Amino acid sequence: MQADPLNKPVFFSHGTLQVGDPSKTLTFYRDFLGIGCRRHHTAALSAFHGGLWMIACVIAGKGLHRQGPENRWLLDMDTADSVGEARAEALTYQDHFGIRTVTDLTPTDDGGISFMIEDIDSNWWEILHRPGKTGRWVDEAFARGDVC
């Protein structure tokens, strides 16, 4: 990377996901994932969980594109047990929330545990716990700089 970037943004405001039915999506995000949602526009809703940015969830209707698990959002949990409990709840409420897929619990490379959910809109969510890294690993990764 060059020493002086060509652009100098002052704020990272949001990214975008596609949704089919905003009411169902809002209920899943709020009541299952535990993240905040607000319906701020007739064609979109916003999802957030603290911090300085949000996810804009734009209505795609019948034009919704299926995603693969490589395009996922990660939600850190405070314990390994809470990950197992979240998976059990995903299976229990799968039909209620329209969850398409719930994967098995899988060990992570750094001693944690995770599983993934494909939601009603074909967006993927990885719910995980990594001992000693919850909420800090992103800052630590960027502080290390490039390693490849």
Image: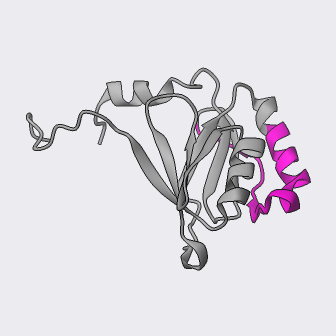
**The residue stretch that appears in magenta:** 84-109
Displayed quadrant of residue 25: bottom right
- Looking at the image, residue 35 sits to the left or right of residue 13; the answer is right
Q: Magenta includes 5?
A: no
Q: Which residue is nearer to you in this view: 145 or 40?
A: 40
Q: Nearer the viewer, residue 17 or 105?
A: 17
5 on left or right of 45: left
Question: Residue 52, how many percent across, how many down?
Answer: 43, 30
Where's residue 85, x and y in %?
85, 38
Using the rendered view, name the quadrant where residue 146 is placed: top left
Residue drawn at x 63%, y 43% as measured from the top left: 37
Indicate the position of residue 131 as horizontal and vertical percent values: 64, 24
Total label count?
A: 0
* Residue located at (40% from left, 30% from top): 141
The answer to whether residue 118 of the structure is visible from this angle is no
Q: Is residue 7 visible?
A: yes
Q: Which quadrant of the figure contains the C terminus? A: top left
Question: 100 or 120, which is in the foreground?
Answer: 120
